[in-house]
Image (cartoon, rainbow, N blue to C red):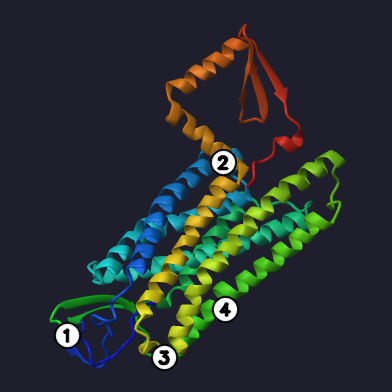
Amino acid sequence: MSPFNYNSSLYSFWGDEGSLQSSYALNIDDEYLSVPLAAKIFLILSFALTFVVCGIGDTFLCMLIIRHQRLRSVTNLLIANLAVSDVIVAIICVPIKLVYYIRMQWIGGKTLCRLVGTLQVASLFVSVNTLLVIAIDRYIGIFWPLRPRLKKTTLVVIIIGIWLFSFLVALPTPINIEMNSGIGENGHVVSICQEHWYDRTLGRMYISFITFSEFLVPCFLMGFIYFSIAQRLWFHRTLPGNQTDQNREISLIRKRKTIPTLITVVVAFFLCWAPYYGYNLALQFRHDNFEEMGSLLTVYFVVESVAMLNSVISTIIYLFMSPIFRAELVNLWKPLMYGQRFERRLKYESQRGRYHIPSRTGSNISHTKNGSLNVVRKSSHETGEARL
């Protein structure tokens, strides 16, 4: 959605053939573009954080999951899908849109205008649909623990389906996005990339549809699912299934650690995107009132910035709240940060007697002074896939 509204008294725009189109224009004058400095700084910081944290952090998250086979659980692979959608927005959409908002001038051409808008909307739908699939998978795993987990091939089909469905729902965006160029009151040529619905009724129907189907319904379902899961984990003493008491307790503790992380991600998603959807609904259904609102662009800057911060928050949550990812993060950075000091420490530990190297088979390989190897097998519940 675009923050700009129409008023034929201020701008005249040219169509593709160079003919003058005076039937509509963008209501952008010097007063309209007067955005408070605080809003501009907030926007720049939000977009910069998204570019750095998501561009680097989510790429690193995907590398961890690809590099370590034990991290390739169903939940973690779905989290990687979330990370991919965030990386696309952070690397492609964020830099281009930041330059656009600072200059208030689109310089990328019509194709890039449509590409950026479509990728941002589709990535948003990929995120919410993936979060919903994660919640459903957790629900099935806790209420029906004996049911076989999703196979990797089935999971790949689900992920592909998420992307296809998300782009299908986002299809009206490239159809209705356009780039207009014209002469403003001050004589300068202005180019604007915007989403414009010539049929106001269709625009209202579409924004109502995506608000309902891609925001309200998924958030309600995820809230219900995690509330049910919390009741089962915290208020039921035992979980169904043929397990020993020790394994049941270990499984319960692990799942209790997992769910708060996922709930935090869902709550952050709702709080960050609710203002954005509310703004677009108000823009469609209270358009006349917005025309008299000189701070419309300021409101758009704020809601867009808050929405972008959701990707930053979720990346930080996954990397630092999850003990598995946090441990892998430390292990990966130790050699880079300490270099030879880290290697000397390993050598010192080996000279003292023995040190342990975790193997891919789930065993502890202990090296002794005389060079012999002792292999200690872990129990079955310790050798399973590492999960969030």
N-terminal of the pair, mark 3 or mark 1, is 1
The residue that disc 1 covers is: 185
Which residue is at the far top?
Answer: 370
**Left or right for 78, reference 221:** left
Q: CA distance from mark 2 to mark 4?
A: 35 Å
Percent position (x, y) of residue 182?
A: 18, 82
Q: CA distance from mark 3 to mark 1?
A: 23 Å
Percent position (x, y) of residue 133?
A: 62, 61
Three-letter amino acid code at the position of disc 1: Glu
Number of numbered markers: 4
Which residue is at the far left?
Answer: 187
N-terminal of the pair, mark 1 or mark 2, is 1
Q: CA distance from mark 3 to mark 2?
A: 49 Å
N-terminal of the pair, mark 4 or mark 1, is 1
Three-letter amino acid code at the position of disc 4: Phe
Three-letter amino acid code at the position of disc 3: Asn
Q: CA distance from mark 3 to mark 4?
A: 23 Å
N-terminal of the pair, mark 3 or mark 4, is 4
The residue that disc 2 covers is: 326
In the image, what residue occupies the spot 58% across and 14% down? 350
Classify mark 3: helix, strand or loop: helix
Q: Is residue 267 visible?
A: yes
Q: Nearer the viewer, mark 4 or mark 1?
A: 1
Percent position (x, y) of residue 73?
A: 62, 46
The residue that disc 3 covers is: 289
Q: Residues within 10 Å of mark 4 (few under 14, many from 20)?
A: some
Three-letter amino acid code at the position of disc 2: Arg
The reply to whether dot 2 and dot 4 touch (C-beta < 8 Å) is no
Q: Residues within 10 Å of mark 3 (few under 14, many from 20)?
A: few
Quadrant of the image occupied by residue 223 = bottom right
